[in-house]
Image: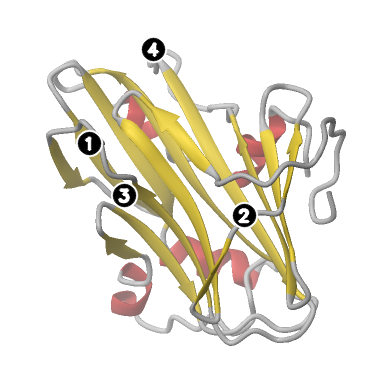
Amino acid sequence: MKLFKGRHLGTSLKQEAFIDTPLGDISLKLFVEELTYVPNKRFALPNGGTLYGYYYDQFDAELVICKPKLYIPSHMVVDNSQAAVFRVKPNNTVHSCDFVAEWEKGYNWEMFGGNSGQYLESVEYKNRLIRLHLGTQDGEELMNRKINGDMIPNSLKLHSDIERFNFIEYINHGFRIPFNQILKDEICQVHFIVAWTKNIADDVSTWFAVDQLTKNILEGEELI
């Protein structure tokens, strides 16, 4: 564990990274300079989460998948939630780096639709029984984080509302977060959150659940 600070347990094991949900699996993918990289280490975290390590000559990256600590209105409840936090630190400048969360084949949702809000990109998926949201921070919030020195590459320049609102790409039933350049020793951090519950009319609890700060996600595993 190089990029997160906290306690960790377990041994290394090469394995694909994904989030298991009642509607199917959501895979988490990392592309650096248009090449797909898979984790070559895996560590069990103390409170049930998993840390995947991508340790290569060109860069170090880590992906934490864990149960986030949710801050939602007190009357709202979700059945479950999982989140994924990527951190990438190049050993030499990389000229493109994409983070992807997308559904694997075999999903069993029947309907979907965009459901974004301020600082949030989100899609709702549902079938007769289950409602699920997949969310991530939007371009406006990523620019705010860059201004505040919060693990966003200096190369990110979104000057207009159109650029900010269209930065996150909707792809094949998922999201892609693309960065053009990450300098040597810069750290880039992004996250995805999934929350699901019973499909009850007008219930917006899962939408609120995917609108979280990264620190809320990591809090349950005592990571910073």
Any part of residue 150 in sight? no
Q: Which residue is mark 3?
A: 117
Tell me the quarter of the image containing the C terminus.
top right
Mark 1: secondary structure: strand
Mark 3: secondary structure: loop
* Alpha carbon separation for disc pair 3 and 4: 20 Å
Residue 6's x, y, as percent? 85, 38
129 horizontally vs 161: left or right:
left
As shown in the figure, which amino acid type bears the numbered disc 1?
Tyr
Q: Earlier in the sequence, mark 1 or mark 3?
A: 3
| Numbered circle sitting on residue 86 | 2
| Numbered circle sitting on residue 125 | 1
* Alpha carbon separation for disc pair 4 and 1: 22 Å
Q: Is residue 56 above or below residue 217?
A: below
Give residue 74's quadrant in the image. top left
The reply to whether the C-beta atoms of the residues labelled 3 and 4 are less than 8 Å apart is no
Mark 2: secondary structure: strand
